[in-house]
């Protein structure tokens, strides 16, 4: 159980933290930024190795909308991470500085552009897998699957986090960053540091929340329209619980 908890939850959480820390370039300076980025890609390689069977099963089984969206999302995430990795090596001034590769200001812009989109896709990725994450947490903590009070409190918390995420989008100027627009607005790290990470956590949480509840709504409409779809949804939920128990 502890080993599975580490590989299924702690490993992705560590990668998310490293990605988050890497965004604080103007606070950490270049060397820590590159060290965090290098550690991120090492953990990413481990994450891929742990989940290698997902790639082997791509052409197996039936595809519904959820699985198609998940596959497309993963391919976009992989593409963005590849862009991030390649541009990291080219523009490196510390870890890979010895390589005879000419620097490029344009590749620096692409590097940041890819990093911001990775944050968005990671949020959507989290939302798609939220039910499984919760199943693993409940199994690890020995919590009952159903609890009305806990569900209510979590929904209130989710609403508050979503509101904070909307505000964080505006505070950090995320839309300009995602559309490759230039902006003179930079976070003032001499005034505050902690809010920077808090706002980026809110930014990632917003697409996660929208994706999760969007999929919940879709499954409810689908199960209402088709008894067979309702059975498929129940089977998917049981599979998530079984995986958590096996872990």
Image (cartoon, rainbow, N blue to C red):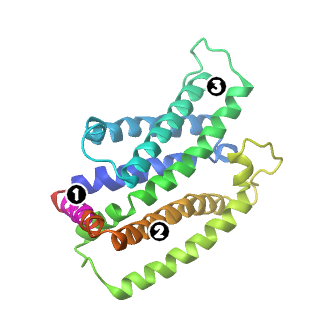
Q: Write down the residue under mark 1.
A: 2
| Direction top: furthest residue | 100
Point out which mark residue 213 bears. Answer: 2
Q: Which residue ends up furthest to the bottom in the rendered image?
A: 149
Give the camera-side residue of 45 and 93.
45
Residue at mark 3: 91
Name which quarter of the figure residue 31 lies in. top right
Q: Quadrant of the C terminus?
A: bottom left
Looking at the picture, how far across and down is residue 108, in whole percent? 68, 31
Question: In this view, which residue lies farthest toward the left?
Answer: 246
Viewer-proximal residue among 140 and 149: 149
Q: Foreground mark, 3 or 2?
A: 2
Q: Earlier in the sequence, mark 3 or mark 1?
A: 1
Distance from Cα at disc 2 to Cα at disc 1: 29 Å
Determine crowd level at label 2: few under 14, some 14-19, many 20+ residues with C-alpha closer than 10 A: some
Residue in the image at 52% along x and 40% along y: 36
Question: Residue placed at 66% from the left, 33% from the top?
Answer: 110
Q: Residue furthest right?
A: 184
Mark nearest the camera among 2 and 1 is 2
Circle 3 residues within 10 Å: few <14, some 14–19, many ≥20:
some
Marks 3 and 2 sit apart, C-alpha to C-alpha, by 39 Å
The Cα–Cα distance between marks 3 and 1, rounded to whole angstroms, is 39 Å
Q: Secondary structure at mark 3?
A: helix
Let me know if residue 20 appears in the view. no
Residue at 45 percent across and 38 percent down: it is 75
- The magenta region covers 234-244
Marks 3,2: beta carbons within 8 A: no
Q: Which badge, 2 or 1, is on the more N-terminal residue?
A: 1
Specify whether residue 133 is painted magenta. Answer: no
Q: What kind of secondary structure does the magenta stretch mostly adopt?
A: helix
């Amino acid at each position: 159980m502890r080993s599975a908890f580490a590989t299924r939850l702690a490993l992705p959480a560590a990668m998310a933290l490293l990605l988050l820390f890497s965004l604080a370039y103007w606070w950490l300076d270049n060397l820590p930024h590159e060290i965090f980025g290098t550690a991120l890609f090492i953990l990413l390689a481990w994450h891929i190795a742990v989940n290698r069977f997902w790639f082997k099963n791509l052409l197996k089984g039936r595809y519904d909308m959820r699985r198609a969206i998940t596959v497309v999302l993963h391919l976009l995430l992989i593409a963005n991470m590849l862009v991030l990795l390649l541009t990291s090596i080219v523009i490196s001034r510390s870890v890979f500085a010895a390589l005879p590769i000419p620097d490029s200001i344009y590749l620096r812009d692409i590097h940041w552009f890819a990093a911001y989109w990775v944050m968005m896709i990671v949020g959507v990725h989290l939302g798609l897998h939220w039910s499984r994450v919760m199943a693993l947490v409940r199994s690890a903590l020995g919590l009952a699957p159903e609890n009305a009070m806990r569900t209510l409190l979590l929904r209130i918390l989710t609403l508050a986090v979503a509101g904070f995420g909307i505000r964080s989008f505006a505070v950090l100027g995320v839309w300009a960053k995602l559309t490759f627009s230039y902006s003179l607005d930079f976070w003032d790290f001499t005034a505050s540091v902690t809010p920077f990470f808090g706002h980026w956590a809110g930014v990632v949480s917003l697409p996660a929340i929208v994706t999760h509840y969007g999929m919940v709504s879709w499954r409810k409409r689908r199960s209402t329209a088709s008894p067979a779809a309702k059975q498929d949804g129940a089977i998917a939920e049981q599979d998530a619980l079984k995986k958590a128990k096996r872990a």
